[in-house]
């Protein structure tokens, strides 16, 4: 059986447009091959007629249920959209038709709805850049500015390719950083879960056995049993504490600028993780600035997008200071060196780029180098953290097991 997506040719007038729904259908084409697909239609009868017009003998048609929760549009979805649009336009497919094809082939309804809005704006005479600018949550200033620059210069396909490459590399870098940050969390969560299981369910069983010994228990065993008794009776206290802490931390990070800035500064000083965050910020700075130079955006203006793309307040503040310095006529490499947070290699490569007029190329090489460094650090961390997880769990589980077996060893010695 083949899968087919029928191009939507819905009635454009009348109130029925507000009643359109997604229908799944099955049918047989002129060659006798069973096919199926999904199509937006006013009602099943209209869809049946449309399928017959396309040479498909319709069979089962049913309305696809709407999801309970509308999925969010992720940055990775935008990167995928940019790459798809680039590929289709380079293949000679007109923009409106490209958008229709991308919207009909997506798995995320939220992305499809967004693309429909873009298509409607462009059909009404708007440029792609202006259509994208209406959705700032999905398309940031850098994305919009590059597209507008491409439209003005007649190099939209080239700019879309640069946007797609930038988004793909940016999301890949974010994924690596998140992967590095997840390992310590996994260690802590695993230790807490294993300890809770042993203290709440396993150790009380040993306690019943020890009560029949009629002998004094070792201090370590008594401590673990007391901890188990308290946790069984008051299990809700640590659970409530973790929930309150998590909510308070998340709320403060979202609402308090001072707290968020404090976290950004502290995170850069953490062992191993801090190095990864520093290198990733430098890579994002270089990649973003290289992309802006490729679009012909002036340096001072480009710094606005670059500052927001670094992902850390320390580098964002440094970029703002560099923007002020370059606006006064200071060379970029000099302004960069003044901040004292960029590696010497970045400063020197920037200087070479300024002197040779190859800033885009030099910054792209810097971004490639530091993205590779982040990749290597994450791989090294993953290899180092696995035995650490086993060691931490071994100490916790082993300690609890020893506490439970000490009385047995003691009893065996007496016997």
Image: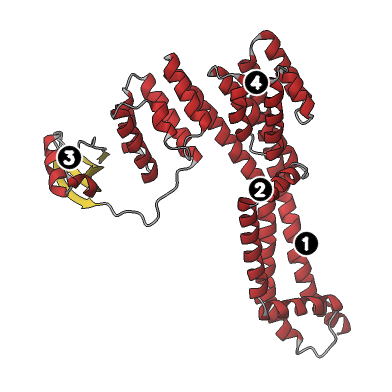
Q: Upstream in the sequence, badge 4 or badge 1?
A: 4
Residue at the spot of label 1:
395
Q: Earlier in the sequence, mark 2 or mark 1?
A: 2
Identify the disc placed on residue 363. 4
The residue sitting at 58% across, 30% down in the picture is 305
Q: Which one is nearer the viewer's eye here, 8 or 128?
A: 128
Cα gap from disc 2 to disc 1, whole angstroms: 39 Å
| Discs 4/1, front | 4
Q: Is residue 193 left or right of residue 138?
A: right
Front of the two marks 1 and 3: 3
User: Circle 1: is it few (<14), some (14-19), or many (20+) Cα within 10 Å?
Assistant: few
Residue 356: x %, y % from top left: 68, 8
* 3D distance between C-alphas at marks 3 and 2: 49 Å
Q: Position of residue 4 (x, y in %)?
A: 26, 37
Task: Give the Cα distance between marks 4 and 2.
Answer: 30 Å
Point out which mark residue 257 bears.
2
Q: Is residue 238 above or below residue 117?
A: below
Q: Is residue 77 above or below residue 260?
A: above
Tag of residue 70: none
Instruction: Report which quarter residue 170 is drawn in.
Output: top right
Query: Splitting the image into 4 quarters, where does residue 11 fall?
Result: top left
- Give the crowd class for mark 2: few <14, some 14-19, many >=20 residues within 10 Å: few
The residue carrying mark 3 is 13
Under circle 4, the secondary element is helix
Instruction: Work out whether residue 151 or residue 241 is closer to the camera in this orientation and state it.
Output: 151
Q: Mark 3 or mark 4, which has the lower sequence index?
A: 3
């Amino acid at each position: 059986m083949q899968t087919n997506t029928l191009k939507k040719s819905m009635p454009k007038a009348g109130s029925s447009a507000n009643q359109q729904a997604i229908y799944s259908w099955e049918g047989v084409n002129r060659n006798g091959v069973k096919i199926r697909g999904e199509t937006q239609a006013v009602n099943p009868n209209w869809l049946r007629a449309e399928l017959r017009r396309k040479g498909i003998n319709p069979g089962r048609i049913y309305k696809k249920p709407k999801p309970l929760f509308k999925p969010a549009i992720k940055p990775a979805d935008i990167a995928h959209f940019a790459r798809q649009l680039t590929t289709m336009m380079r293949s000679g497919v007109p923009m409106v038709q490209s958008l229709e094809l991308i919207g009909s082939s997506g798995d995320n309804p939220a992305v499809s709805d967004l693309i429909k809005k873009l298509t409607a704006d462009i059909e009404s005479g708007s440029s792609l850049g202006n259509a994208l600018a209406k959705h700032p949550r999905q398309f940031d200033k850098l994305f919009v500015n590059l597209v507008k620059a491409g439209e003005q210069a007649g190099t939209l396909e080239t700019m879309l390719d640069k946007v797609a490459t930038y988004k793909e590399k940016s999301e890949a870098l974010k994924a690596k950083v998140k992967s590095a940050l997840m390992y310590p969390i996994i260690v802590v969560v695993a230790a807490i879960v294993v300890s809770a299981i042993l203290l709440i369910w396993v150790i009380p069983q040993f306690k019943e056995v020890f009560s029949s010994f009629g002998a004094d228990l070792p201090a370590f065993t008594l401590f673990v049993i007391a901890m188990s008794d308290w946790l069984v009776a008051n299990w809700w206290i640590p659970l409530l504490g973790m929930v309150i802490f998590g909510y308070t931390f998340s709320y403060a990070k979202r609402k308090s600028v001072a707290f968020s800035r404090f976290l950004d500064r502290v995170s850069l000083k953490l062992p191993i993780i801090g190095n990864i965050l520093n290198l990733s910020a430098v890579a994002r700075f270089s990649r973003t600035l290289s992309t802006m130079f490729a679009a012909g955006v002036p340096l001072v203006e480009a710094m606005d997008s670059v500052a927001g793309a670094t992902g850390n307040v320390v580098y964002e503040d440094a970029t703002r200071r560099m923007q002020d310095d370059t606006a006064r006529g200071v060379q970029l490499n000099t302004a960069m060196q003044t901040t004292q947070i960029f590696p010497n290699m970045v400063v020197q490569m920037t200087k070479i780029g300024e002197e040779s007029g190859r800033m885009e190329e030099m910054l792209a090489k810097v971004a490639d180098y530091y993205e590779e460094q982040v990749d290597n650090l994450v791989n090294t961390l993953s290899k180092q953290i696995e035995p650490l997880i086993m060691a931490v769990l071994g100490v916790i589980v082993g300690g609890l097991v020893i506490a439970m077996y000490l009385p047995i060893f003691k009893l065996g010695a007496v016997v």
